């Protein structure tokens, strides 16, 4: 059985913005994992999913071993690109995304945190990454499938069905019963 984690499509980054040294133009290159390989030997494509900030999640990160606070920082997880799916409306605009997790009982995710520059010394601090289980990941990404469908209007009947009901000869009888 697979589980799903829902998040906004704006939280997914699938390409890295780089400057092409030959032309000087901005190029977008996909993220690849440094060590994970496909069966043919090529590097596996990954997506970066930004986690919600501390006000929009039910999970609190503790300080790391060096005493650096991780809860207020921006963080992300890396997942295989083929596990990220999108929900589109009318086949045009991507509205929501979700992550399909296979082997949910064994799933462990690593949350990486952004570095901050110390204002006094000018050096960057490096908070340690954090391992979270699927249960904890669901507390980080609190959106549910029911909420997503309601927000996108996917649980409402199609407008064609409403028009057919309005033209129905039994419409007045149905309205009288409802009152």
Image (cartoon, grey):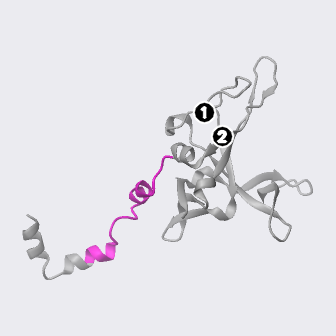
Q: Quadrant of the C terminus?
A: bottom left
> Is 143 contained in the magenta span?
yes
What residue is shown at x 77% (from left), y 31% (from top)? 126
Mark 2 lies on a secondary structure that is strand
What residue is shown at x 77% (from left), y 52% (from top)? 17
**Numbered label attached to residue 61:** 1
For mark 2, what is the residue? Answer: 75
Q: Position of residue 139 (x, y in %)?
A: 51, 43
> Is 38 contained in the magenta span?
no
Image height of 146 relative to 161, above or below:
above
Query: Residue 116 sits in which quadrant?
Result: top right
Going from N to C along the chain, the mark reached first, 2 or 1, is 1
Image: magenta residue range: 142-163
Viewer-closest of 179 and 108:
108
In-image side of 58 versus 51 (left or right): left
Crowding near pointer 1: few (<14 within 10 Å), some, many (20+)? some
Image height of 76 relative to 39, above or below:
above
**Numbered label attached to residue 84:** none
Q: Quadrant of the N terminus?
A: bottom right
Q: Position of residue 119 (x, y in %)?
A: 75, 20
In-image side of 177 versus 77 (left or right): left
Viewer-closest of 98 and 102:
102
What residue is shown at x 41% (from left), y 54% (from top)? 147
Residue at the front extreme of this rendering: 105
Mark 2–mark 1 CB contact (< 8 Å): yes
């Amino acid at each position: 059985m697979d589980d799903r984690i829902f998040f906004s499509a704006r939280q997914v980054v699938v390409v890295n913005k780089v400057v092409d040294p030959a032309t000087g133009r901005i190029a977008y290159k996909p993220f690849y994992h440094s060590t994970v390989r496909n069966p043919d030997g090529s590097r596996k494509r990954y997506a970066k999913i930004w986690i919600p900030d501390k006000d929009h999640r039910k999970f609190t990160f503790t300080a790391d071993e060096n005493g650096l606070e991780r809860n207020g920082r921006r963080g992300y997880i890396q997942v295989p690109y083929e596990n990220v799916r999108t929900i589109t409306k009318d086949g045009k605009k991507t509205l929501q995304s979700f992550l399909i997790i296979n082997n949910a009982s064994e799933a462990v995710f690593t949350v990486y945190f952004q570095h901050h520059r110390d204002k006094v010394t000018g050096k960057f601090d490096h908070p340690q990454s954090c391992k979270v289980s699927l249960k904890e990941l669901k507390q980080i990404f609190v959106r549910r499938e029911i909420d997503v469908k309601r927000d996108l209007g996917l649980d409402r009947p199609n407008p064609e069905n409403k028009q057919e009901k309005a033209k129905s000869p039994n419409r007045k009888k149905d309205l009288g019963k409802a009152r």
